[in-house]
């Protein structure tokens, strides 16, 4: 069984943040993703990350969040551990 790809989390992050009003703490966003998509995560997704004390899927989601900041979908100026949609992020959610 394989882990969920990092890119899969892009749409899930957009959805979670949209549902949470556009801005949320990292933990709130991850909890919303788990509530919405937890049933789709594989057994391997739940294994602990070797470098952090979090499941692999949460680590992959955090890396995708970094790519989304680079791509202008999430605000790079947000405080640490706060994930916030930009206008481009709202547009990307609406286009999905």
Image (cartoon, rainbow, N blue to C red):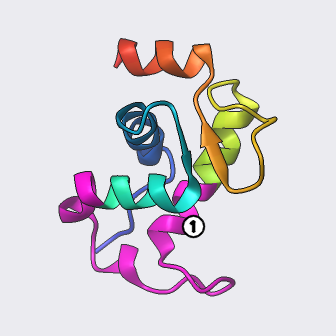
Which residue occupies 59% across, 86% down? Answer: 53
Furthest residue in direction left, as rendered: 39
Question: Viewer-proximal residue, 31 or 58?
Answer: 31
Does the magenta run of residues contain 77?
Answer: no
Vertical placement of 17 versus 36: above or below?
A: above
Relative to residue 50, is residue 22 depicted above or below? above
Q: Position of residue 52 (x, y in %)?
A: 65, 83
Residue 71, how many percent across, how many down?
69, 27
- Element on which disc 1 rests: helix
Going 61% across and 44% down the picture, which residue do you hit?
83
Horizontal side of 82 relative to 47 (left or right) equals right
Q: Position of residue 59 (x, y in %)?
A: 57, 67
In this rendering, is residue 7 above or below 43? Answer: above
Q: Which residue sits at x=52%, y=56%?
A: 61
Quarter of the image that includes the N terminus: bottom left
Q: Position of residue 21 (x, y in %)?
A: 44, 32
Q: Report the number of discs.
A: 1
Residue that appears at 49% across and 74% down: 56
Say left or right for 43 vs 89. Answer: left
Instruction: Judge from the rendering whether residue 89 lies leftward or rightward of residue 70; answer left or right.
Output: left
The reply to whether the magenta stretch includes residue 42 is yes
Q: Is residue 57 left or right of residue 2?
A: right
Residue that lies at the very extreme toward the right in this rendered image: 77
Q: Which residues are magenta?
A: 35-62
Residue 62 sits above or below residue 68 on the image: below
- On the image, numbered disc 1 is attached to which residue? 59
Q: For residue 85, what is the image quadrant?
A: top right
How crowded is the residue under tag 1: few (<14 C-alpha within 10 Å), some, or many (20+)?
some
Q: Quadrant of the C terminus?
A: top left
């Amino acid at each position: 069984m394989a882990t969920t790809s990092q890119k899969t989390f892009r749409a899930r992050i957009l959805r979670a943040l949209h549902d949470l009003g556009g801005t949320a703490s990292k933990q709130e966003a991850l909890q919303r993703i788990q509530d919405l998509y937890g049933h789709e995560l594989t057994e391997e997704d739940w294994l602990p990350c070797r470098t952090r004390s979090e499941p692999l899927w949460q680590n992959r989601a955090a890396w995708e969040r970094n790519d989304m900041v680079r791509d202008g979908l999430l605000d790079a100026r947000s405080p640490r551990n706060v994930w916030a949609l930009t206008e481009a992020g709202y547009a990307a959610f609406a286009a999905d």
